[in-house]
Image (spheres, grey):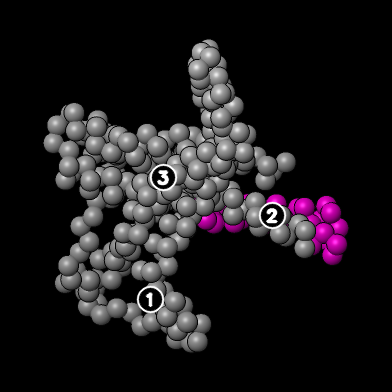
Amino acid sequence: MSLSPLTPPAKPSGPLSGLSRFIGGFRWAFMPLGLLALIAVGVHAAADTLDDRLLSLVDMADATFDRLVGAYSFSEGLVDLISLERRTFIARVLALSWELSVDLVLALPALGYRESRASPEAEPWRKYLAQDTRPTWRQLFLRSLRKPTTVRWTRPLATAGVVLAGACAVARLLQGSVYLSWRELLGERAADAAARGLALGALVGILVTLGWRAVLRNLQHADTASQENVHNRLQALSYGLVGSALAVPLAIAAVLDASPLLSFLR
């Protein structure tokens, strides 16, 4: 019977390997920032789709106000108090406030992302070190089923929606840049095909490298917060309810209006 070695295998040598290890040493910094940026881009893309809806709500509120004050002679002068420019400004302020609030709810936890150590099977010598005790995907999912809370279900799902919108926004930007810069060189059809292919590759790459990590991080954060702050059914429903009420509608808008997946294929 052969014994597993207690020392790690020799690392590959060469300038590229050294550069890769050097850059990899900064994953603790750029991975959380990458997750935060992806979520923030998705939230911004979703908020952009709500500007017109918010303006419609402000117009409805203004019309109701005009009807109320116009019904009496002493308040007739208040009719048309809020101009179209002011209503537009109010709608933009509401959209920006909503966007920043959801950034705090969904993007800020991404800064707590940390890489896990390699498994003991891959590096047997690590069994002599303290191991990462954070729950796995399966454990978190089972806990969400057995002890459901508002944040355990809404925060990861909302994160998935805005992450998809963020990946689509980056892919659309790449598609447009490649098409415009390659159109004269390759022709419209070839440039369009190349732009769509690169955009799809970017979309898949972002979701594979960053997307699932962002969802996992918010699931971990929601699980930890629930473990520490939820002790009864009322708290399970009420804890984080305001943040979830802000994040869920924006996530729905992100999926329905800011994630044109089929546009990369047509």
| Marking on residue 102 | 3
Q: Nearer the viewer, mark 3 or mark 1?
A: 3
Q: In this view, does 102 lie above or below 11?
A: above
First along the sequence among labels 3 and 1: 1
Q: How crowded is mark 3: few (under 14 residues within 10 Å), some or many (20 or more)?
A: many
Q: Which residue is drawn at 72% across and 41% down?
A: 266
Residue 154 seen: no
The span shown in magenta is 182-207
Residue 175 or residue 145, whichever sits in front = 175
Q: Residue at x 42, y 67 (%)?
A: 30
| Marking on residue 176 | none
Magenta span dominant secondary structure: helix
Q: In which quarter of the image is residue 182?
A: bottom right
Q: Which amino acid does label 2 sit on?
A: Gln
Q: In which quarter of the image is residue 3?
A: bottom left
Q: Residue at x 59, y 54 (%)?
A: 170
Residue at image mark 2 = 175
What is the spatial separation of the Cα atoms under label 3 and label 1, in whole angstroms?
31 Å
Residue at image mark 1 = 25
Report how many numbered discs are placed on residues in the image: 3
